Amino acid sequence: MTLRQAQGPIPEADAHGDVSVDELQLSQELSGVGAVAASADIAEYALRLGDDALILSQQLGAWISRAPELEEDVALGNIALDLLGHARSFLHYAGSFDGRSEDDLAFFRDEPAFRCAWIVQQPNGDFAQTIARQFVAATYMFELYSALRASSDATFAAIAEKSLKEVDYHRDHAVQWMLRLAGGTEESRARIIRANADVWPYVDELFRDDELIERLGDAAVRPSSLRPGFDAVVDTVFAEAELSVPAVAASSAGGRHGAHATPLGHILAEMQVLARRHPGATW
């Protein structure tokens, strides 16, 4: 299965005509297509952003048919599809450096070659655990894409412009559930407090600068510059929910450099098994 197939069928142009989809049509769906090929550093940065979106999409997709209510089956499924679209655009751009397709990068890289942050690798857990993780991820992505629209790299700017509109909804969805869980029953409040404590050690990794960011300059967004906006949203939501920011030590997470948490291996095994068992298969 290709990433495009996972996003669902393309409407037929003619109910009785040719319904095949060629590679050119698939590429036209992606944000930023038509730009020059990525350099090595640009490709590495694109992998970071694409892998975050891809793994989080895979995680949220697991809630389909398992969410606590039908509306959440639809909401989490739609968020997962949005993130899959972001991942396709970033991975397509990353692959322009060395000729690999988005499917090559998604399905035929081993764990150390992924560049996703540890927070997106954390288990879904219960619904509160997923919401706590989603609140952090969506709030971070909103700040990231807001800033990336000003990138000196035209492809990054184009992807960010489109993605921001979707991430705005993702963040609002997570905020509403944070408030509902914190203000609901004693059980729901206890669960969201525990969930926040579980995910908070992985927040700091999202805002760490490194040599790649220094080399990219205005093409990338300096992660540390996003922390004030992120913290402002967290403080506002936690104050309304009467929650406290967990006082926990930061993880030594190294996902940006290929050192991953244990769950990623299980996620990739499930995500990649069909493509690896039947390479080149189409339907």
Image: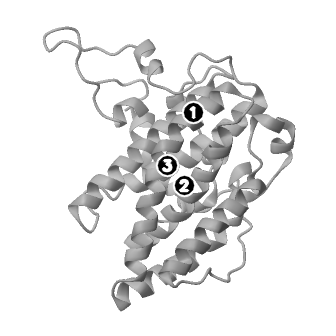
The type of residue carrying mark 1 is: Ile
Q: Which mark is residue 192?
A: none
The percent coordinates of residue 63 (x first, y second) are 33, 59
Q: Is residue 184 among what the camera can see?
A: yes
Dot 3 corresponds to which residue?
A: 167
Snapshot quadrant of residue 99? top right
The percent coordinates of residue 101 (x first, y second) are 54, 25
Along the viewing direction, whichever of 39 and 147 lies nearer the viewer: 147
User: Whole-Å distance between the Cαs marked 2 and 3?
Assistant: 26 Å
The type of residue carrying mark 3 is: Val
Against 119, residue 14 (above or below) is above
Q: Which label lies toward us, 2 or 3? A: 3
* Mark 1 touches mark 3? (CB < 8 Å): no
Snapshot quadrant of residue 23? top left
* Mark 2 touches mark 1? (CB < 8 Å): no
User: Whole-Å distance between the Cαs marked 1 and 3?
Assistant: 12 Å
Which type of secondary structure does the marked residue at label 2 adopt? Answer: helix
| Mark positioned earlier in the residue sequence (2 or 1) | 1
Along the viewing direction, whichever of 240 and 248 lies nearer the viewer: 240
Q: Residue at x 57, y 72 (%)?
A: 236
Against 179, residue 120 (above or below) is above
Q: Pointer 3: residues within 10 angstroms few (<14), some, or many (20+)?
A: many
Q: Residue at x 44, y 59 (%)?
A: 172
- Colour theme: one colour
Along the viewing direction, whichever of 107 and 175 lies nearer the viewer: 175
| Mark positioned earlier in the residue sequence (2 or 3) | 3
Q: Pointer 2: residues within 10 angstroms few (<14), some, or many (20+)?
A: some
| Mark positioned earlier in the residue sequence (1 or 3) | 1
193 left or right of 176 in image: right
Q: Residue at x 55, y 77 (%)?
A: 238
Dot 1 corresponds to which residue?
A: 159
Q: Pointer 1: residues within 10 angstroms few (<14), some, or many (20+)?
A: many
